[in-house]
Amino acid sequence: MHKWAMLQRPADIYSTPEQVGRRAGRAWFGFAAVGFAIIAAALYGAGLYARGVELKALAAQGRTDANLKVALLSAVLENPRALPLLLSEDQQVHDALSQRGAAAIDALNRKLEGLVSGTKASVLYVTGANGVAVASSNWRVPNSFVGSDYGFRAYFSRAMQSGTAEYFALGNVSKRAGLYISRRVGSATAPLGVVVVKMEFDQLEANWREANRPTYVSDEHGIVLVTSIPSWRFMTTGDLAGPDLVAIRHSQQVGHAPLVPLPITRPEALSQDVWIVHAVTPGGSEAEYLRLSTPVPTTPWRLDYLVPAEAPLAAAVRGMRLLTLSLVLPLLSLAAYLLWRRQSAQMRTATEQAARSELERRVAARTEDLSRARDRLQSEIVGHRSTEARLQVVQQELAQANRLAILGQVAAGVAHEINQPVATIRAYADNARTFLKRNQTAPAEENLGAIAALTERIGSITEELKAFARKGRTAAAPVELRSIIESAVVLLRSRFAGRLEALVIEPSPAHFKVMGNRVRLEQVLINLVQNALEALDGCDHAKVEVSVEETADGVALSVLDNGPGIPPAILKSLFTPFNTSKETGLGLGLVISKDIVNDYGGRIEVASGDSGTCFTIHLLKAA
């Protein structure tokens, strides 16, 4: 038995040092090949993962920026849309078109000149039913529009047919591109002419250029209209079909622009509205971008926003690969160390029959090698820890930059805040038109006076928001709560005609005064009351109570409704930007309201259940 046991021992016991060395060489070669394959696979996988994560982050931030730009563009478009509506019902316009007297036309010229200087419009002009301009805000300049024939323009023909039109084109006289908003004067059966306002987007495009990220707006044909890169205007997002191209050339919408496609190639779709593309900027260099596309409300336009992706993707891939190396290399080093230990043991076993002196010399050499290997491992570990610390610092800096970028979301509130007075203006204008048709001038004048007051209010809101953007807050001053409530009810009366019987104002025992700004606090109250009334739409026995009471640390203004309450999912993130349950809402009303109240040292509390919702505004009492 002992003889057979000896014969079945591993062959390594009888291997010479030279044989062990040859096997060790082959083992190290295989280990190196496997190690390089592992490192290559890990780096490749880390690159793919980092690229995917960074693309999602860029897309999320890009969507936020694109939505802000769309909100600002919508706000810019809302201002001039009211001018043609008002002027089409103006008596001076009717007199000038019907009488064609020199005095009436001169008075209209001066009126248009005064209106355009107080708005953001480029030019205002009135044409007769034949399309020839009768009066214009630029009547004093040599190349005035007065006398020019615009009958061939689409905005004239469409306004004459359907009553109103919006059309982006190159100016026939000025050679400057802009949006033409027109409205027919008179009835469809007896039209007197057309009122036209032209709006240019120079300031908006200049603001986009400062961000150094290509942005452009295209129409339903894919023609670029508004862009941060001037040379891209009147280029196309794709090839135009023959009939469309002929119609556009015939309308002279783009002048002699060649209508060539944009220098954007190799699109790779990531989702329905996000692509990876390569674009050539005016500098001539081609770069990789993330293109996000979103529709512009109330228009057939789309806004495309290009986010530079090359540098962020490269940085993310580098960072992830460094992190991967910091994890893989120690593991491979440990495996190499274990392999080396195993081979060393085999080598020591093979040399056990050597002389004691040779054994002692080899043991000393191996001990020295182990010490050097330990030092190398310690040095690598210190380097890896330093790399991890630098990565943590970079991650903290990126998180801080992301938090600072959220501050830009306040700019999107401009469109939301002026939509309420604009909706009321539209309601008053419809009422005034009805009164005029009935020859009831007195109530029509009252409605027009209300429209003028609301227009001033829009200007006040805009100025307040501009001041907020510059300084962060408006200085607080004593303001009476009763006047704020009364003004809010006036603004809501036309918007919710027939439903304000549900609104109950509890009389306050005294004229409470709080610290704040009247216009901004009106905005907060209007937002809360409007939300309550909309929540009660279609409910029986609807009721909204507004009450005021004095508290230990100030004054509490409450808005209570008996609606179905706020769903828990919405209530949990109620004051988060862009969180809304309305199909047409931006999700900014409560966010802005909370910011306004916080600016004046107050706070907003909300309680909601099956029996209704109560918003309570706590404000500091004025001395």
Image (cartoon, helix red, strand yellow):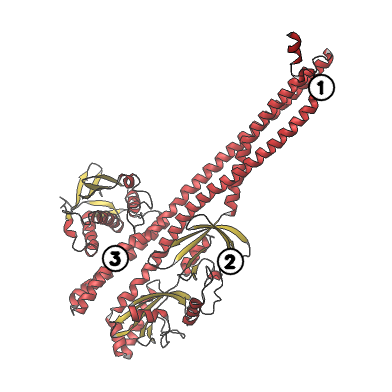
Name the spot of residue 203 as percent of width and height, x first. Answer: 47, 67
Badge 1 is on which residue? 17
- Mark earlier in primary sequence (1, 3): 1
Rendering coords of residue 50 (x, y %)? 56, 45
Residue 283 x/y as whole percent: 62, 65
Q: Nearer the viewer, mark 3 or mark 2?
A: 2
Nearer the observer: mark 2 or 1; the answer is 1
What kind of residue is marked 1? Pro
Q: Image point 35% across, 79% down: which residue?
A: 159
Query: Which label's residue is closer to the chain start, 3 or 2?
Result: 2
Q: Is residue 339 left or right of residue 486?
A: right
Q: Is residue 338 above or below residue 193?
A: above
Q: Which residue is mark 3?
A: 423
Give the residue drawn at x 24%, y 47%.
Answer: 614
Q: Residue at x 18, y 74 (%)?
A: 443
Q: Which residue is mark 2?
A: 263
Q: Is residue 363 visible?
A: no
Quarter of the image for residue 196 reads bottom left
Total residue callouts: 3
Q: Residue at x 37, y 49 (%)?
A: 576
- Say if mark 2 contacts mark 1, CB within 8 Å: no
